[in-house]
Amino acid sequence: MSKSILVVDDYPMVRKTVCSLLAWHSIEVCGEAENGRQAIEKVKQLKPDLVLLDINMPVMNGVQAAYEIRRIAPSTKIVFFTIHDSPEAISAAHVIGADGFVSKAAAAGRGGER
């Protein structure tokens, strides 16, 4: 059984790139959202196995969304995928109970350079 992923980021190009990379590796993307509020609605509707979630977004940020996703879908994995790789952001991810944290800078091959 394949795992499904919801990709949440406020930048369409980031979502498109991530979805393309996941598809290249035969990973199912069940949906996309551009803010935390949309992410919560998509989690209710699509029941993804994993949410790949940016932190800094309009309407509702990723931290607020993660709290709510954890409440409504406790078995859904949450991985933050964000440019905010400060110790505070990583600590907040752990407090929420996120299952992972990936720096966009590191993922882009810049090794954390800004």
Image (cartoon, helix red, strand yellow):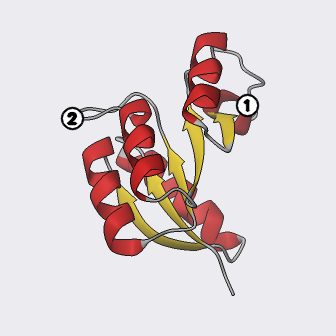
Position of the N terminus, as image quadrant, is bottom right
Judge from the rendering whether residue 43 lies leftward or rightward of residue 103; answer left or right.
left
Q: Residue at x 57, y 67 (%)?
A: 49
Q: State how far apart marks 2 and 1 are (Cα).
A: 26 Å
Residue 106: mark in rendering: 1
Residue 52: mark in rendering: none
Q: Amino acid at mark 1?
A: Ala
Q: Is residue 108 visible?
A: no
> Which residue in the protein does label 2 denote?
59
Task: Look at the numbered disc 1 and give the secondary structure of its residue.
Answer: helix
Q: Residue at x 61, y 38 (%)?
A: 97
Q: Is residue 31 above or below residue 105?
A: below
- Nearest the viewer among 103 and 70 is 70
Q: Position of residue 54 (x, y in %)?
A: 47, 38
Which of the 4 image quadrants contains residue 18?
bottom right
Which of the 4 image quadrants contains residue 111?
top right
Q: Position of residue 33 (x, y in %)?
A: 34, 55
